[in-house]
Structures are given as C-alpha cells and as structure tokens.
Amino acid sequence: MNIIKLDAIGSTNTFLKELVSTRPVPNYTVVSAESQYNGRGQMGLKWVDEKGKNLLFSVLVKGELLEKMSGVCLNYCVSLAVLTVLMRYNLTKLKIKWPNDILSESNKISGILIENSWKKDAIKDAIIGIGINVNQLTFDSDLKQVTSMKTILGSDIDKGQLLLQIVDALKNEIENYKAGSFDALKSRYLKVLYKIEIPTMFKDSEDLIFLGKIVNVSNSGKLQIELNDGTIREFGIKEIQMLKKL
Ligand code: BTN
C-alpha cells in the first residue's frame, strides 16, 4: 500500500487533494497524520484531535474504480467498511448515524468526510477522510456524546493495524459492490442505521421540533422520516437534526 505518514498537518484530506492536483497518485494512496491543526468535519465543522492518540487518515479512490458509483453508494461502502472493522474489536452497539457517523452506545466514535471531484455526472476522484477516536480518553467539554475505543475497551489499540484493516475492508466493499447490487448494499446499510423505525425527536431547518421515525434513505441520499400522520418528509444533511431524548 502506498502510505504517506505525516506527523502534523492541517488536514489529511486537504493534503491529499493538493497532491492529486499536482501529480499522478495511485489508487488507494493513504495519507495519515498523528495530529491535524485544521482537521475538517462535515458541514464546515472542525475535527479536533489529541496529538498521537487517534487515527486520522485520507484515502484516494479514483474514478475508474468507482464506475457508475454514485456518491450515495460510495458513502454506504465507506460507512460499512469502518463499521465492519470496528465490529471485530467487540465494541458495543455499533450503528451508523445517517449519513456516516459511527456510533457506539449512541456516542460518536468515528466521523467520515468524503470529498468527491466530478467529471460530468461521474465521480472523478474521491478523497475519503476518516477520523477514529482510538486512544483518546478525554474530550473538550463542548463535545457531547463522544467516545473512543480505549474508553470502551480499557486498553490501547494499535492504530497501524486498524488503518490496514479499514483500507482492506474498503477495497472489499468497493469490489463486492461491482459484483453485487445497490439494493443489497443499501439494505445492509439500513440494517445498522441508528434509530431506524424508532420514534425520535427531530428539529428541522426552521427550528420546528417534531416526532417521527426514520424509515428509509432516498436514492439521492436524503433521509426519509415518517410523521405521526403517516406522511413521509425528506431531508438533506443541513436540513435536519436528531434530538437526544424523547
Ligand atoms: C465528521 O464527522 O464531521 C467528519 C470528520 C472527518 C475527520 C477526518 S480526520 C482525517 C480527515 N482529514 C480531515 O480534515 N477530516 C477527515
């Protein structure tokens, strides 16, 4: 595997993106860092880490491997790859919170930031950034509902081994998808989706709080929530927030 190990960097996603724009980079090239000073999360948020404690890396997957794969489909492959590997560590109650947070016991243990570049309507390159809370034990007080592997398992985890397993699982997911179907992939994703079919409180982009249950994800990747009266509303990532308790 082509792996570039860095000590500190702004963001492994940004570093890999810049590398790809300046020279040919082989498929599945990995950039990992011990620490990021400008780690990026979903929706423009920051991804903060304690130096040396967590797994922070980005993988390049090039378009020819993603033939006719949509962004939604790639997201399912990545989320399932991370979940599958974390399951081997006996972490409890692992779920995917739509679209791609990985939770254990309702606390976030991993975040994923996929940045695609497009050529017409096909993905040209995908930079898949993955952060896993591995050996960190204390978190900023403003970070709620967060956990790490060491918090749950009680001992240090080898980050190098974890990285190799995840890249391997990702390759498998992408290869298997080619031989399988979108429906089969999606049904595996829905089976492990956090709060599916469970009445939950949500807040929409107009700050309206309502009770509903997640019933599906549309083919374009929107979350489908069934309301009390049986109607189904669809939400994009910036349009909905799950509230903690009923
Ligand atoms: C999220 O849950 O908001 C996504 C977090 C993604 C964090 C990873 S860490 C490695 C890679 N580099 C970044 O700057 N972000 C991703």
Image (cartoon, helix red, strand yellow):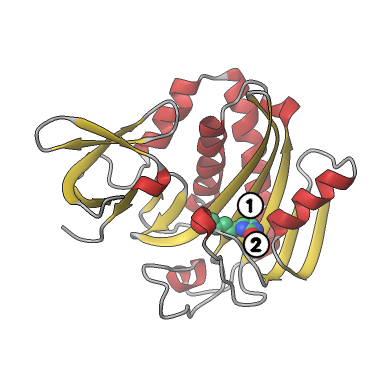
Q: Check whether the beta carbons of the residues at disc 1 and disc 2 lie within 8 A of each other.
A: no
Q: Position of residue 7 (x, y in %)?
A: 78, 71
- The answer to whether residue 1 of the structure is visible from this angle is no
Q: Is mark 1 within 8 Å of ligand 1?
A: yes
Q: Position of residue 183 (x, y in %)?
A: 44, 21
Q: Is mark 2 within 8 Å of ligand 1?
A: yes
| Mark 1 / mark 2, whichever is N-terminal | 2
Picture quarter containing residue 229?
top left
Residue visible at 41% across and 45% down? 237
Q: Which residue is mark 2?
A: 56
Where disc 1 sits, the SS reads: strand
The residue at the far right in this view is 23
Mark 2 Cα-neighbour bin, 10 Å: few <14, some 14–19, many ≥20: many
Q: Is residue 19 above or below residue 52?
A: above
Residue visible at 20% across and 50% down? 200
- The answer to whether residue 69 of the structure is visible from this angle is yes
Where disc 2 sits, the SS reads: strand
Q: Is residue 103 above or below residue 114?
A: below
Mark 1 Cα-neighbour bin, 10 Å: few <14, some 14–19, many ≥20: many
Residue closest to the eye, 97 or 14: 14
Q: Amino acid at mark 1?
A: Gly
Residue 129: numbered disc: 1
Q: On the rendering, which quadrant does ligand 1 occupy?
A: bottom right
Residue closest to the eye, 203 or 85: 203
Q: Is residue 174 left or right of residue 64?
A: left
C-alpha separation, residue under disc 1 versus residue under disc 2: 8 Å
